[in-house]
Amino acid sequence: KYIRDFMKYRAPYNWTRGVSQKVMAFTQADKVSTVLDSSKSYYKSVSNAETKLEEIYKALDAITRLNENSDVIVALNNVNKMLPSLKSELSNSNEKAESWSGSIATLDDGEVKQLLEGEYANSAGSLNSDAIDAFSKTINSDVESLKAYEKLSKEEGEITESEKVILRDLDRTFPNNSFFANKYGQGQRELYP
């Protein structure tokens, strides 16, 4: 009897609640459209940041195949010039995320708002651009180190004691490698242009 009495009031309540949620979704169609536009704008901004990040990755990957310090310095400076646009795109993504969150806040409480809040919570977030600044400082430090090394190499013009040890041991370390087999051969000379 208790269950029957509970259910006779519960069923109309559930039905009414479901109908009101569906009607509310239609009455908020403009607001929901704004939320969806905001989310689309955010995803596009994140996609742009990802494209810029891929360009930077490719440029860094290309550096690993360079042989000359001067080429590495030029390539690192080019990467450093790419970083501000990535930082700008990350900042833009953060603004879009805030706009998306703000548009969700304008919705009336209900299942539609909960659904859109769930998508936002699982997708959006603040992208930290502080790492870009730290990376830029590291690149600048590396460039300065490479320039200092080039300057010292040009000033000395001679092989250092450490380099002599390496040259002396290369033919013993790699006796079967034709590139290093001859003492002061081509392979050893190319180590120190």
Image: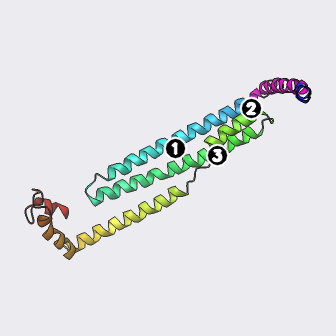
> What's the residue type where badge 1 is placed?
Ala
Going by the image, does 63 lie left or right of 188? Answer: right
Q: How dense is the environment of label 2, judged by Cα within 10 Å: few (below 14), some, or many (20 and up)?
A: some
Residue tagged 2: 112
State the separation of the CA atoms marked 3 and 2: 23 Å
Q: Quadrant of residue 102?
A: top right
Looking at the image, which is closer to me, 123 or 71? Answer: 123
> What's the residue type where badge 2 is placed?
Val
Looking at the image, which is closer to me, 152 or 90? Answer: 90
Q: Vertically, is 71 above or below 141?
A: above
Q: Residue at x 62, y 49 (%)?
A: 126
Percent x, y of residue 156:
22, 74
Residue tagged 3: 95
Q: Residue at x 55, y 41 (%)?
A: 46
Q: Secondary structure at mark 2?
A: helix
Percent x, y of residue 22:
79, 24
Q: Nearer the viewer, mark 2 or mark 1?
A: 2
State the separation of the CA atoms marked 2 and 1: 29 Å
Q: How dense is the environment of label 1, judged by Cα within 10 Å: few (below 14), some, or many (20 and up)?
A: many
